[in-house]
Amino acid sequence: MPTQVPWLIFLLPFISFLLCGLVLRPFLPKFPKLAGYVTIAAVGISCALSFWVLGAVIAAPNHMLMVDDITWAVVGDLEMHVGVLVDALTAVMVVVVTCISLVVQIYSQGYMEGDTGYTRYYAFMSLFTACMLGLVLANNILFMFVFWEGVGLGSYLLIGFWFHKPSAADAAKKAFIVTRFGDLGFLAAILILFANTGTFDTEALYKLVATGALAGSTLTWVAIGIFAGACGKSAQFPLHVWLPDAMEGPTPVSALIHAATMVAAGVFLVARFYPIFSHSPEALLVVAVIGAFTAIFAASIGLVMNDIKRVLAYSTISQLGYMMLGLGVGGVAIGIFHLSTHAFFKALLFLGAGSVNHSTGTFDMRLMGGLRKAMPWTYITFVIGALSLAGIWPLAGFWSKDEILIAAFANNQALFTLAIITVFMTAFYMFRAVFMTFHGEYRGGAPSEHGGHDEHSHGLHESPAVMVVPLVILALGAIGGGWVNVTGFFGSLFGHGEAVAREISLVEGFFGPLTHPLPLISLLVALAGIFLAYAMYIKKWVSAERITQSVKPIHTLLYRKYFMDEFYEGFIVKTLLYNWLFKLFAMFDDSVVDGTVNGTAAGAAGAGSALRKLQNGQTQLYAFTIAIGVVAIAVVVLLFS
Amino acid sequence: MFTVGLMHFLILSAALFAIGLFGVITQRNVIKVIMCLEIMLNAVNIALIAFSQAVAPTSLTGQVFAIFVMVVAAAEVAVGIAIVFSIYRNRESVDMENFNILKW
């Protein structure tokens, strides 16, 4: 494989960004469709190249290809390089990112049709994808940070894509600022690493950790710092608050953010620096505990949300918690495996929600219902995605979630308990969403300004093929995506978990889980969750309203998202920042900074008003002073030289 | 036999310079101040020529310099006297103590 191939994977979307932004938008505004075609072509070629790279990595010894290094800048002793590192992790990530991105770009053609910002949309999408690919491919932590922030920028631009809506602009700011808190930790980790090792290079860092040159508390703090960055981007507790608000962007953007780019970045980062984490049990425990807690925390909020995208958003946070748990208790392979399968079904679910919105004009599930007749394709694919997310055998989600549960069970029973409860919640809220959206009677859709509900319900329609085909493609991924690890192939690719592929046949691996107690338990728990949703929302054996009433305080607590937003807004932002920290800064500014400036000025003025008395206009006095001065200088020179 | 050397010229020059400076600082009459200034210039001329003779007798640098000083001094006196006339017409005085309007 030529060394240019990994470079091209990153460069093609980037070129597409430049082309859309600098050429198509200003010079060819008459042909907005062009931007979509350019982006799809670029990402499509990237996707093909990614599969080539994956094939080459699988064939390569140690599943490790090459590090292509170019010196970028030299400042004194500090040399900065750009380069690509292609190992199994990179190869899998580029495939996932480009696949999801490609499908989302195709889908966007239908969803964004007629939007005035069509070209801008595709320019930002290209940039977003390019930054994520750059992050995945970079071989040193410095460039990872550059692209890391690039991903943040891309998400900011896309969440705030409809910037004329104040809520979208606020959500974009929130996403940017909240993730920035995590980035602080990441930056600190980079600085600690560089101060201790003098290198940014990923492979060099691996070696230093392996030889024990980097160990002890330094290592732990570096790991915690990196994890803090990952927490921000991957929306882990307590930095998860930005992700549900990120719904304000166009739905395909949400799909991309939730599946492949933004939130995957954090999980990827932990996986990339897994050698650092694996040498620090404390850091691994932190990752696992935060992950498990986030999983159950977000799932519980998802139980009561009424906005279909918010249900999916909390589900994403919860699943990211699973990935972190998988990384914490299992290893790179387990976490990334769940990331890959999750990418397919979560993108599918989001695009499905977008398709529903395209038809009904709303995201509020209380206004939907009965859509399965009008939108059969969307319905079928959405159910496949929901089943996969709930972890039903043999769909993709089952395999990856199962790996995490097994690893958690072996390592930490308490975390396993949290995870298995989350399985139940996940199944329940997903099928609550399915039943509220697609079953029962249609409840009217978006309140429209002209005409009643009848007119609107006639307007229910299946989305165009350009939107349905991506759904079907993703549904295939959501069904079969997990089968790559049926024989342990995926795990062996990473060299973690199983050292070599298990010597079992495909059939044996496929049906194997059904003969073991643990997968069976998780399967039964998930089915129980689905059954509860069925009982509550289809058969109405149990009234959802009555339950809500009987546990009103808990429902309110969940519905208000544990008052985290209020806490951040009221306590952290208003009290801690505005009233304390910023007041302190203001005082410092007023007294110290302004004091210095004003003091300098006042000193100069005072000295001037004192000294000007000396200038009395008496020329002879000046002459006398000059003569005395010359004599004094002469004396000093003669005496001291 | 008593020979006149560099040192003697320099002592003469220094003495003249000091006398001139004393006059510039102490005299009230602006005409006298200008005259004292001329004494200082000539003291410098003596020093220049003495050094020229003692240090580099073949080159005429010092002498040429002295002639320049004379030329400049002549011009300066012309301008100076003109200024004094002008001030005198305004203030009816040649006393330096009255010339103090150039201050804050």
Image (cartoon, coloured by chain):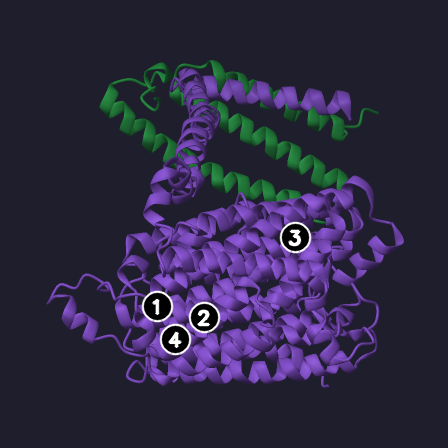
Indicate which disc, 2 or 1, sits on the residue closer to the N terminus. Answer: 2
For the residue marked with disc 4, what is the amino acid? Thr
Q: Which chain is in purple here?
A: A
Residue A424's spot in the image, x, y percent? 54, 54
**Quadrant, the N terminus of chain A:** bottom right
Which badge, 3 or 2, comes first in the chain's sequence? 3
Going by the numbered disc 1, the residue's amino acid type is Phe
The answer to whether residue A418 is above or below residue A56 is above
Q: Who is closer to the viewer here, A124 or A428?
A: A428
- Give percent across and percent down for residue A623: 49, 21
Q: CA distance from mark 1 to mark 4?
A: 9 Å
Q: Which chain is green?
A: B
| Chain to which mark 3 belongs | A
In the image, what residue occupies the spot 70% across and 52% down? Answer: A328
Residue A438, which numbered label?
1
Q: Which residue is mark 4?
A: A378
Give the CA separation, mark 4 to mark 2.
8 Å
